[in-house]
Structures are given as C-alpha cells and as structure tokens.
Image: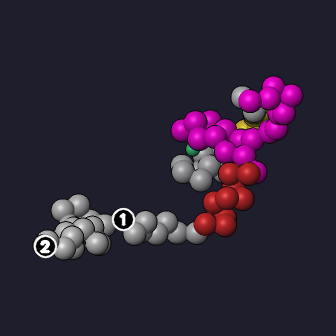
Amino acid sequence: MSCRRCQGLMVTIRLEDAASSTCAFSGWQCLLCGEVTDSGIEANREGHGEPRRNGARPPGTVPVGFGVLKRE
Ligand SMILES: [Zn+2]
C-alpha cells in the first residue's frame, strides 16, 4: 500500500480506540509524511468523492430573511 498524500511506503500499525482500550484495530502509517489511515477512513473517502461547496453564504452578504421586518 502506498500513501495517498506522498505515495510513500505505508506500514501496518496497531490503533486503539481511546474510548475503549479493548477495541484495537490495525491501520497504516506512512514512513515519509506520517499520514495515518485505516480501512474505515479509506471507506469514507471512497464514498465521498470530490469535495463540494458547503452552501454557506459569502462573507458580507445579507442573510435570507434579514431586514424584512415590517415597520409600523
Ligand atoms: Zn505519505
């Protein structure tokens, strides 16, 4: 397996869940850049594809519905 970031050599490491020390699983760590991943992370990356815009309004723009209060 090669690193997703730098294509370096990745070695198997043992990861432990911080919440429960009994739950340990294996992952991979890159020898060059230190990237750590595991099968769960890889599965999530495969399912997401390219990042997309989050739909947040650009800075400086007026929120929808803002400023429509009726003045008597
Ligand atoms: Zn790397």
Farthest-out residue, top:
21
Dot 1 amino acid type:
Ala
**How far apart are the two marked residues, 2 and 1, measured between alpha carbons?**
32 Å
Question: In what quadrant does ligand 1 lie?
Answer: top right
**Residue 55 in magenta?**
no
Residue 1 visible (yes or no): no
Give the labeled residue for mark 1. 56
As rendered, which of 12 and 16 lies closer to the eye?
A: 16
**Residue 38 in magenta?**
yes
Q: Quadrant of residue 69?
A: bottom left
Q: How is the image coloured?
A: secondary structure
Q: Quadrant of the C terminus?
A: bottom left
Dot 2 amino acid type:
Glu
Residue 55: horizontal and vertical position, in percent? 40, 69
As rendered, which of 67 and 29 lies closer to the eye?
A: 67
Left or right of 44 on screen, residue 22 = right
Residue 11 visible (yes or no): yes
Alpha-carbon neighbours of circle 2 within 10 Å: few (<14), some, or many (≥20)? Answer: few
**Does residue 41 lie above or below 45 as drawn?**
above
Residue 23: horizontal and vertical position, in percent? 84, 33
Left or right of 56 on screen, residue 30 = right
Residue drawn 31% across the image and 67% down it: 57
Residue 28: horizontal and vertical position, in percent? 71, 41
Which contiguous range is marked in magenta?
A: 19-39
Residue drawn 83% across the image and 33% down it: 24
Give the labeled residue for mark 2. 72
Residue drawn 82% across the image and 38% down it: 25
Left or right of 52 on screen, residue 18 = right
As rendered, which of 3 and 19 lies closer to the eye?
A: 19
